[in-house]
Amino acid sequence: MPETVQPALEFDVEKYLRNSRKVDISDIDLSQAARYPVSDDEVRALTYMCDIESHTVVYLRAILNTCAIEDPQTTSFLSCWAYEEFFHGRTIRQFLDAIGAPVSATRMLEVQQASSFTEWLKELGSSILCRFSRHFHGAYLTYGAISELSTLEGYGVMAQRTQNPVLAEIVRRLAKDERRHFSFYYNKARLELRARNAQRLTNFVIRHFWLPVGGGVKSDSEVSWILSFILGNPEGAEIARRIDTTIAKLPGLEWFDRLSSSRDEALEAMGKEKEMSCPECRSVFVEERT
Ligand SMILES: [Fe+2]
Ligand SMILES: [Fe+2]
């Protein structure tokens, strides 16, 4: 059995509020970043993450449109959470600037305009669902837990894999924040999901509407690319299983295997794409993955 990420048994919201601050990189000399290698794939992954971190405020608007706004603990957390996520996006942007791969000033607007109609529908659906069931809390908290855990693991992979020590340190610090975010969503979801109806509604929402981090905001091919970049190798398969196992410990979510299945689908989609553009690359790509 793969290990699971163990959050603290209780999440101390007051402590989180007291300690919440923007990620501090004032001791990191960004002018040194360009002295070390950064691969094109890393730039692509960082641009993806920068887009998603910066998109948090749009997600916040959607989530506050639901019954999340009725829970004082959640609204306190979300206020600080959005602030921290904003600075994650800004920090990645600073790193990309420092290595000569700047993100355009209008990038956030472009990402918002590209975000799909289904995202909008999902927002609308959430606010309507809330009017009919007080159990919707379990659904968005579970969704949040999966996203934060995926992001935390993603930054961990980048920190371990990169040849650039400046980047490694930055993503390690971002991962530290993501771990606390995950802990909030996961622990609160666990409490909400004690109710059988909350489990039913959460299962419905996750089965039908769940997407990997960036899904609905980035194109499907870009989502497949990031999944295969982060999780494509055998260690990645292990990480996907670890995320699944952790989420499957939530009440009613025993079936959860979506990270592993999304990884498989992404690898298949990437293989097909490569095969179409370069048939002889197919065997090489399959070898790379195994
Ligand atoms: Fe973040
Ligand atoms: Fe986060």
Image (cartoon, rainbow, N blue to C red):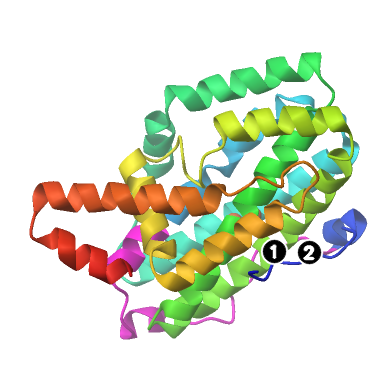
Ligand 2 occupies quarter: bottom right
Which quadrant: the N terminus?
bottom right
Q: Is residue 203 above or below residue 247?
A: above
Does residue 68 appear in this view? no
In the rendered structure, which amino acid carries the disc numbered 1?
Arg
Give the side of residue 57 with respect to residue 158, left or right. Answer: right
Q: Quadrant of residue 113?
A: top left
* Number of the label disc, if any, that sits on residue 236: none
Percent position (x, y) of residue 105? 37, 47
Q: Secondary structure at mark 2?
A: loop
Q: Is residue 73 above or below residue 4?
A: above
| Residue at 87% in and 58% down | 11
Percent position (x, y) of residue 73? 88, 43
| Residue at 63% in and 69% down | 2
Toward the viewer: 242 or 140? Answer: 242
Cα separation between marks 1 and 2: 8 Å
In the rendered structure, which amino acid carries the disc numbered 2?
Pro
Are the two marked residues, 1 and 2, in contact with CB atoms closer than 8 angstroms? yes
Per the rendered image, the range of residues in magenta is 19-47
Give the side of residue 38 with respect to residue 204, left or right. Answer: left
Q: Bin the neighbour count of mark 1 within 10 Å (Cα to Cα): few under 14, some 14-19, many 20 and up.
A: some
Q: Quadrant of residue 194?
A: top right
Give the side of residue 273 with respect to residue 148, left or right. Answer: left
Give the side of residue 248 with respect to residue 122, left or right. Answer: right
**Residue at the disc numbered 2:** 7
| Residue at 37% in and 32% down | 114
Percent position (x, y) of residue 104? 33, 49
**Residue at the disc numbered 1:** 179
